[in-house]
Amino acid sequence: MVNEEKLALENDVLSYVREFAEKEIRPIARKIDEEANVPEELIKKMIDMGLFSSYIPEEYGGNSLSFSFLVRVIEEISKACPSTALVLDGALTLFAEPLLMFGSEHMKKKYLSRVAKGSVGGLAITEPGAGSDAASIKTRAVRKGPNYIVNGSKIFVSNGRIAEFFVFDAVTDPSKAHRGITAFVAESSFPGIRISRDIHKMGIRGSSTVEMVFEDAVIPVENVIGSEDDGFRVVMETLDAGRIGIAAQAVG
């Protein structure tokens, strides 16, 4: 698709998004905030509109629309309800983006195709003792044969209860400080992973935010994003993209 055609398509879709946000999201935004929940039917409508597939490349079942388009969509939805926008933002800028940048071809085919169909992803990197200092994490991953065994906890996990999978990081070589951190994809159904509590917030209350515990969690080696001990770079570049999405929410 040539740039002019893609731009025209993006503008057409954006007009539908704007109308959708005003007519279907804004009227229930207060309810979403009060009940701390984005309704499943609202997420399904975003899936049916092709918003989850918009930024995913065509080879993985998406539409290959631009990152700038995604940011504009997040902005328009945020005008009505930032909690609803964060469901989409978390799935694409916080989960899909690191896979696009660093994931193996196998990983992209396995997970990006599911995002394109509407599966929600999330990000789990913050820990009780490691917030803005991502190099200070304590969650530990130890290689055992074809898997890593992970122990630790994450807090403020975005899309916590609705995510089918998420990106997280763990220390694989404590002797190397931030150069000994590895990034992974985990599925919420993997053994040893559980949600310990919901986190109640002052704002963006409709977005599911949780604390997550890893207790001898089993993560396949093939779920390493990039390479072992390169996770700090993966996380930093993921946050570069994620902050643009958060900025779009603020502008909206």
Image (cartoon, rainbow, N blue to C red):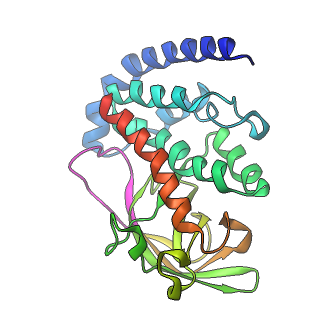
Camera-nearest residue between 2 and 120: 2
Q: Does the magenta stretch include residue 202?
A: yes
Query: Which residue occupies 33% across, 25% down?
Result: 79
Would residue 134 be seen by someone viewing this image from the given angle?
Answer: yes
Residue 162 in view of the camera: no
Please say if 63 is above or below 131.
above
In this view, which residue lies farthest toward the left? 202
| Res 78 → quadrant | top left
- In this picture, which residue range is highlighted in magenta? 196-211
Between 86 and 22, the residue placed more toward the observer is: 86
Vertical comparison of 136 with 245: above or below: below
Image label count? 0
- The x, y position of residue 121, in whole percent, is 55, 51
The residue sitting at 40% across, 68% down in the picture is: 134
Task: Return the x and y of residue 169 as percentages of the image width and height.
Answer: 52, 69
Residue at position x 72%, y 44% in the image: 113
Locate residue 123 relative to residue 243 in the image: left or right.
Answer: right
Q: In which quarter of the image is the N terminus?
A: top right
> Closest to the observer: 29 or 91?
91
In magenta stretch: residue 113: no
* Among the 4 quarters of the image, the one containing residue 212: bottom left
Place residue 221 in its image quadrant.
bottom right
> In the figure, is residue 62 to the left or right of 18?
right
Query: Where is residue 109 drawn, in percent x and y?
Result: 77, 49
Q: Please state if 5 lies on the left or on the right of 72 as rendered.
A: right
- Most frequent secondary structure within the magenta stretch: loop
Along the viewing direction, whichever of 131 and 46 lies nearer the viewer: 131
Residue, x 54% and y 13% (percent of image)? 11
Q: Is 236 situated above or below 120? A: below
